[in-house]
Amino acid sequence: MPKRAEIRALACALSVAVVSSTAHAGPALGTGPEAWRDAGFGAVRGLTVGPIESAFHPDRGYGSEACALAMQDAERFGANWVSIAAFGRVFDLAPSGVSLSYEAPFRSNRARVIAAIRQAHAAGLKVMLVPHLWVENGEWRGLIDPGDDAAWENWAKGYQRFVGEWAAVARETKAEMMVVGVELRTWVTTQRAPSFAGVIREVRRVYPGLLTYAANWDDVHDTVVWGELDVIGVNAFFPLAKAAGDSLSTLEQSSQRIAAEFEELARLWQRPILFTEFGYTARVDPALEPWLWPEHLTGVLPDELAQANAYRALLGAFISKPWFAGGFAWRVFADPYDLSQEPEWGFSPRGKLAELVLQDAFRAHWAADGAPRLGHALAEKSATQVHLVGIEP
């Protein structure tokens, strides 16, 4: 059976209607195709705020005074949402459960994440909470495979405990959206997907807000659980370049092609697309293998203009699309004045040309905002048209 036919068959098997539970702590939003529209949030102009709940950065992590400044900076930047990640640990790709502690005991991490969410809300920002897995041996979480049926069942229970703890935090803090998993390819694109659908349904019993899942950019079309969720999430590190030295025009053409593919996906599932993460590093040819981690690269030539143009090409193809809910740029840090946490060619757009591109995009009218206000100066402008004339390919 062709792969696409397998995906459709799995999707049909998971097409059971999502039932809202009476266990909600408060009034729930509607779920499914109309959930995002009914929430009335408009476009997400988001920033991912890191580091995570880190004991290695005392007084600079989530919930710190520095973090409160970071949230205020995000609002001044033009963001209306932030993404906050809460990590759990597995040792390798055959886990039986998730350790709830990460760099510090769970209760400490929980308190810091709650404080950070409250800081974001105090700054006028909405919050997407992201329970995330860290694999200690350095392997990619998307290849997790506990083993046989019994091992997968045990893993699902352990993961449910992990994500359920953070669902309770999302409920307590009234976070506006929650991610139920990040890059879990072997779970959500295979015959194992029904057990992940069960995790989603259990989360809905705890948390009444919007739910999404963060698929990797290259398997989002093969993910079969979208019918259980409210928004199609994608970690959007698309390789817009085909070869070293590709022009801005080439990047824009690639982005337009990707947007056309995602329009079909949004239509198929009747849900909007959200970039749960997107970004490029400040190096030469960042749109070629954009997922490469900055700290793992050597001999790097920093290039702010290349980073800015990658942002420009990506957003320019998407913000005029009504099915595009927005996204979260990867990333800024909880201490906005700490420049030690990644190399100068890292992902952060702060203080670089990419910051200007993002700010101009955030000020523009996005199709997901609905009808523009009368006299809105940016109503007909896209991110590639607003104040970007000074950034040339």
Image (spheres, grey):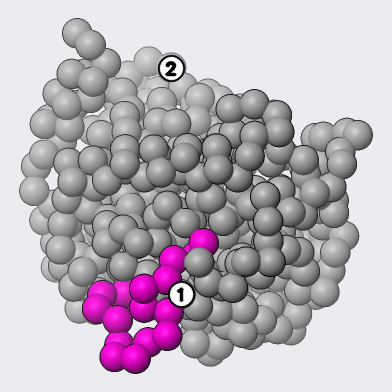
Magenta segment's dominant SS is: loop
Q: Quadrant of residue 60?
A: bottom right
Looking at the image, residue 302 sits to the left or right of residue 27; the answer is right
Tell me which residue sits at (51%, 50%) in the image. Answer: 314
Front in this rendered view, residue 106 or 60: 60
Stretch in magenta: 369-384
Looking at the image, residue 375 sits to the left or right of residue 115; the answer is left
Front in this rendered view, residue 43 or 97: 43
Amino acid residing under circle 1: Ala
Q: Position of residue 50 (x, y in %)?
A: 67, 62
Looking at the image, residue 256 sits to the left or right of residue 132; the answer is left
Q: What label sits on residue 219 in the rendered view? A: none
Tell me which residue sits at (80%, 35%) in the image. Answer: 296
| Disc nearest the viewer among 1 and 2 | 1
Q: Position of residue 239 (x, y in %)?
A: 56, 35
1 or 2: tag closer to the N-terminus: 2
Residue picked out by circle 2: 147
Tell me which residue sits at (71%, 38%) in the image. Answer: 285
* Mark 1 residue element: loop
Tell me which residue sits at (50%, 66%) in the image. Answer: 385
Residue picked out by circle 1: 364
Marks 1 & 2, CB-CB < 8 Å contact: no
Q: Position of residue 166 (x, y in %)?
A: 45, 61
* Mark 2 residue element: loop
Amino acid residing under circle 2: Gly
The outermost residue toward the right is 299
